[in-house]
Amino acid sequence: MTKGSETISSIGAELGIATSAASTTLQEFRGKARVLVVFEELSSGKGEVQEYLLADKFSALREHGVVLIRVAAHGVFESLYPREDLSADAIREELGSPVANKFEAVLLGLDGVVQLRSSQPVAVDYLCQLIEKMPPAGGN
């Protein structure tokens, strides 16, 4: 196991998420974490803008129980670490998202329902405000 996968496993364990599940989709996160899926692309620069917006403020999203999944042309990553057990094609199909060369940011609630879909980079402050309006775990 690499150092990166050990880190992902420990983060997943804290959230009660099995990071070595056989599933190739986002099912493992349902009921356990909100998920921000960023479909990256190279041609427009939107992926780089989104990375910049997330860079300094991602800790705020983690405090809101958000896991970052990046779907890139060369694989799927949880934050910066490869997730070989997740399939880019399966995630695209599950979310009805764009082909490999289009940017999109998708925020899923704890129930796995899409709460936000944007073809433009999204500010972390806006995501946090949106999350604060969502029902908490257990619907309380």
Image (cartoon, rainbow, N blue to C red):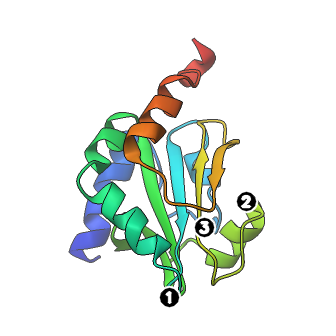
Labels 3 and 1: the sequence-earlier one: 3
The residue where tag 2 is placed is 95
Task: Estimate the x, y position of residue 75 in percent, counting from the top left.
Answer: 51, 82
The numbered mark at residue 22 is: 3
Crowding at label 3, few (<14), some or many (≥20) Cα neighbours within 10 Å? few
**Label 1 belongs to which residue?**
74
**The disc labelled 3 sits on which kind of residue?**
Ala
Q: How far separated are the C-alphas under marks 2 and 1?
A: 19 Å
- Tell me where residue 53 sits by quadrant: bottom left
Q: CA distance from mark 2 to mark 3?
A: 19 Å
Quote the CA–CA distance across marks 3 and 1.
20 Å
Can I make out residue 111 in this image?
Answer: yes
Q: In the image, what residue occupies the spot 59% across and 21% down?
A: 135
Quick check: marks 3 and 1 in contact, CB under 8 Å?
no
Residue 94 position by quadrant: bottom right
Query: Which badge, 2 or 3, comes first in the chain's sequence?
Result: 3
Q: Residues within 10 Å of mark 2 (few under 14, many from 20)?
A: some
Assign a secondary structure to mark 1. Answer: loop
Q: Is residue 53 above or below residue 140?
A: below
Front position in the image: 90 or 51: 51
Task: Pinpoint residue 87: horizontal percent, then vertical percent.
Answer: 62, 75
Left or right, residue 27 beside residue 7: right
Q: Which label sits in the foreground, 2 or 3?
A: 2
Label located before the other in sequence (2 or 1): 1
**Quarter containing the N terminus:** bottom left
